[in-house]
Amino acid sequence: MPSTMIAAVVEKLGQPLVMRELPIPAPRRGEILVKTEACGVCHTDLHAAKGDWPVKPHVPFVPGHEGIGRVIAVGEGVTTVKEGDRVGVPWLYSACGHCEFCRKGWETQCDSAEYGGYTRNGGFAEYILAAAGYVAHIPERIDPLQAAPIVCAGITTYKGVKETEARPGEWIAISGIGGLGHLAVQYAKAMGLHVAAIDVDDGKLAHAKTLGADLVFNAKQGDPAAALKKEIGGGAHGVLITAPSIPAFHQGIAMTRKLGTCVLVGLPPGDFPTPLFDVVLNRITIRGSLVGTRQDMVEALSFAAEGAVKADIELAPLSGINTVLDRLEHGQVPSRVVLDLRNGVQAQAANA
Ligand code: NAD
Ligand code: ZN
Ligand code: ZN
């Protein structure tokens, strides 16, 4: 086995990633080493590389939290994963297992959680070190390239749809039909909801229609909340905002029906004013949602294994990461780009 690997590294926030040769980490107690087959590129990787959020990542770091691969080495004490298993290394890299939130089955809120591709090196690399207890177990029926987006975009939107508390037969409005949103539409349909899709790009909306959206609205062409209410009256029972855009949040509250829940998932930097009168008078719940628990991961993956949800992916080499991030920033990625590392990246690095 080689001793070094190629990784795409953020060395300075706001600067392009750099292809570097790094030592391959050795798994310690409770850890495993994964040989990367694929890693999806999430808009969060862009926020991370730019340092968009109040808690900045420490440079240098390797982004990527949709990494999929085979386990090639296990550390001491690992009993739940074995060599050869296919796993995913998610945003929730690890949690303590003991704090109030872990005890309650809300390990996503753990006080000492680590985040893949943020506080720990992630999947934009040939090998990934992972915490055995927190990896996703990828069913063999799912292609590894297909599995990658499920490990963040899939789990996050599956959980987000559940967090709206919309019931089968009710309406959900999904704002932002990119990597997250195109899976959200499919989860919502599979869960028996009527779906209204909102984006600022007609191509994304046409795609949403093919995925089963019942109504689509372009937020650049008039007020999408007014248009939605005109169609279905009263607004959507659940609203899920994945758009990395502040105006989408105002619109999301305005789309929420009386008694409804508006779930915030997109993470553009900044704040938005809350219309108190509308929220109070209409008894609206505004709720944040962060990825999902290990149980949510099992459930999100099982929809994919059954074929009820399928990511639309475009492949790119690891060396193309800066182009992918640039396209993501400008809304030019149709759904999800997955970095294909099945044949290694040595040749790519030499050309980079
Ligand atoms: P993406 O770039 O693939 O998709 C974003 C979509 O939003 C695009 O289709 C874009 O056209 C659309 N959009 C932009 N402005 C809009 C507006 N005003 N109204 C409606 N749609 C608009 O990004 P992604 O990978 O899907 O991630 C989306 C956001 O979700 C990011 O901010 C990311 O950090 C965040 N995220 C949060 C979690 C979580 O756990 N809460 C998990 C993953 C990603
Ligand atoms: Zn993500
Ligand atoms: Zn904890």
Image: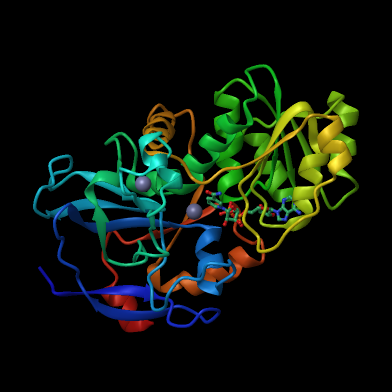
Q: Quadrant of the C terminus?
A: bottom left
Q: Nearer the viewer, residue 20 or 120?
A: 120
Residue at position x 66%, y 56% from top? Answer: 244
Residue at the far top in the pictured view = 169
Q: Nearer the viewer, residue 348 or 233?
A: 233
Q: Position of residue 291 (x, y in %)?
A: 49, 45
Q: Position of residue 111 (x, y in %)?
A: 41, 52
Q: Quadrant of residue 115?
A: bottom left
Residue at position x 48%, y 41% from top? Answer: 154
How many discs mark residues in the rendered view?
0
Q: Quadrant of residue 170?
A: top right
Q: In screen coordinates, is 177 left or right of 229?
A: left
Q: Position of residue 1 (x, y in %)?
A: 9, 68
Q: In screen coordinates, is 101 left or right of 87?
A: right
Q: In screen coordinates, is 223 left or right of 134?
A: right
Residue at the far front in the pictured view = 100
- Camera sees residue 135: no
Residue at position x 76%, y 29% from top? Answer: 236
Q: How is the image coloured?
A: rainbow
- Camera sees residue 103: yes
Q: Nearer the viewer, residue 116 or 336?
A: 116
Q: Position of residue 68 (x, y in %)?
A: 32, 51
- Image position of 204 with respect to 140: above or below: below
